[in-house]
């Protein structure tokens, strides 16, 4: 097994979010998602069949949950479930 870094090999195409599966088991899928400011279009929700745990490593992000008036602001090191 080779050593890899989450902070290298960023996608060349910055016009869309890139997702890469790092680990996939029956109980857990771990993904690296690299975003360049993309967002779900206003009025749409990104519903997923599985729970999601998010950890922000660099930059900043806003995550809005249905029923909440304002997005939750994330900074490096912040996580949420």
Image (spheres, rainbow, N blue to C red):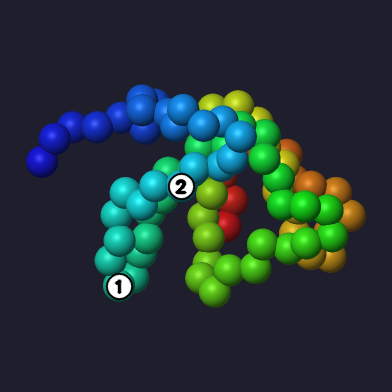
Label 1 vs label 2: CA separation? 19 Å
Q: Residues within 10 Å of mark 1 (few under 14, many from 20)?
A: few
Residue 75 in view here: no
Q: Residues within 10 Å of mark 2 (few under 14, many from 20)?
A: few
Secondary structure of residue under mark 2? strand
Compared across the picture, whether 60 is left or right of 19 comes to: right
Compared across the picture, whether 48 is left or right of 4 comes to: right
Residue found farthest to the left: 1
> Which quarter of the rendered picture does the C terminus lie within?
bottom right
- At 46% from the left edge and 47% from the top edge, which residue is drawn? 19
Residue that numbered label 2 is attached to: 19
Q: Which mark is residue 26?
A: 1
Dot 1 or dot 2: first in sequence order is 2
Compared across the picture, whether 29 is left or right of 53 comes to: left
> Which quarter of the rendered picture does the N terminus lie within?
top left
Secondary structure of residue under mark 1? loop
Residue 34 coordinates in the image, percent (x, y): 51, 37
Residue 35 coordinates in the image, percent (x, y): 57, 37
Residue 41 in view here: yes
Q: Quadrant of residue 68?
A: bottom right
- At 84% from the left edge and 60% from the top edge, which residue is drawn? 43
Residue 27 coordinates in the image, percent (x, y): 34, 70
């Amino acid at each position: 097994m080779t050593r890899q870094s989450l902070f290298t090999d960023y996608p060349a195409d910055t016009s869309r979010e890139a997702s890469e599966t790092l680990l996939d088991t029956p109980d857990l899928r771990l993904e690296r998602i690299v975003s360049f400011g993309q967002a779900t279009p206003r009025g749409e929700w990104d519903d997923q069949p599985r729970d999601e745990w998010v950890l922000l490593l660099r930059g900043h992000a806003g995550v809005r949950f249905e029923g909440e008036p304002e997005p939750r602001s994330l900074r490096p090191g912040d996580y949420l479930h």
